[in-house]
């Protein structure tokens, strides 16, 4: 359908220029040759492989040292954007992050990753 629409557009363009348009079969052949001989410009990214997926970082990779993490000084919850909880093996999203550690952790009636993270 796209080829025929392109040919109709080409044909109307030829009529405006008072040229004789080529037949549909000739147009299809030239289009096929052009597509086969098409080469990407150097430096353009290829669509053959998907972009790399960033690795999910755990709480241990985000957090300060264990000594600072469990010192019980200045670790206050702060509301922010919803990001995945950084406790290992848990995939829920949390809006709460520690002001000192800058780590998003669950803090609700069902799960208290905030306390577990700062005491273990």
Image (cartoon, grey):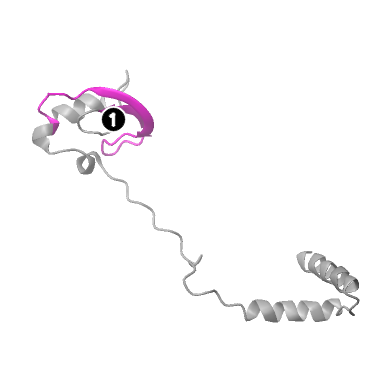
Instruction: Answer few, some or many: residues within 10 Å of disc 1's Cα (few below 14, many 20 plus, some between 14 and 19).
Output: many
Quarter holding residue 119? top left
Which residue is at a point 29% across and 24% down the rendered structure image?
78
Which residue is at a point 76% across and 81% down the rendered structure image?
29
Q: Position of residue 1 (x, y in %)?
A: 79, 64
Judging depth in this view, the residue of 28 and 19 nearest the camera is: 19
Query: Magenta part of the protein: which range?
Result: 69-98
Q: Is residue 93 above or below residue 46?
A: above
Residue bearing the label numbered 1: 105
Q: Is residue 59 above or below residue 118?
A: below
From the viewer's perspective, tell me whether residue 29 is left or right of residue 75: right
Quadrant housing the C terminus: top left
Which residue is at a point 12% across and 24% down the rendered structure image?
72
Residue 62 is a magenta residue: no
Quarter holding residue 9? bottom right
Which residue is at a point 26% across and 42% down the rendered structure image?
58
Local secondary structure at mark 1? loop
Q: Position of residue 16 (x, y in %)?
A: 89, 70
């Amino acid at each position: 359908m796209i080829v025929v629409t392109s040919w109709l557009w080409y044909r109307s363009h030829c009529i405006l220029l008072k040229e004789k348009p080529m037949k549909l079969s000739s147009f299809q052949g030239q289009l096929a040759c052009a597509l086969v001989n098409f080469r990407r410009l150097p430096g353009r990214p290829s669509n053959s492989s998907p972009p790399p997926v960033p690795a999910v970082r755990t709480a241990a990779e985000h957090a300060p040292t264990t000594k600072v993490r469990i010192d019980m000084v200045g670790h206050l919850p702060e509301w922010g954007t919803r990001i995945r909880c950084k406790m290992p093996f848990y995939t829920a999203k949390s809006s709460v992050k520690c002001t000192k550690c800058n780590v998003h952790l669950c803090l609700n009636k069902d799960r208290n990753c905030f306390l577990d993270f700062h005491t273990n």
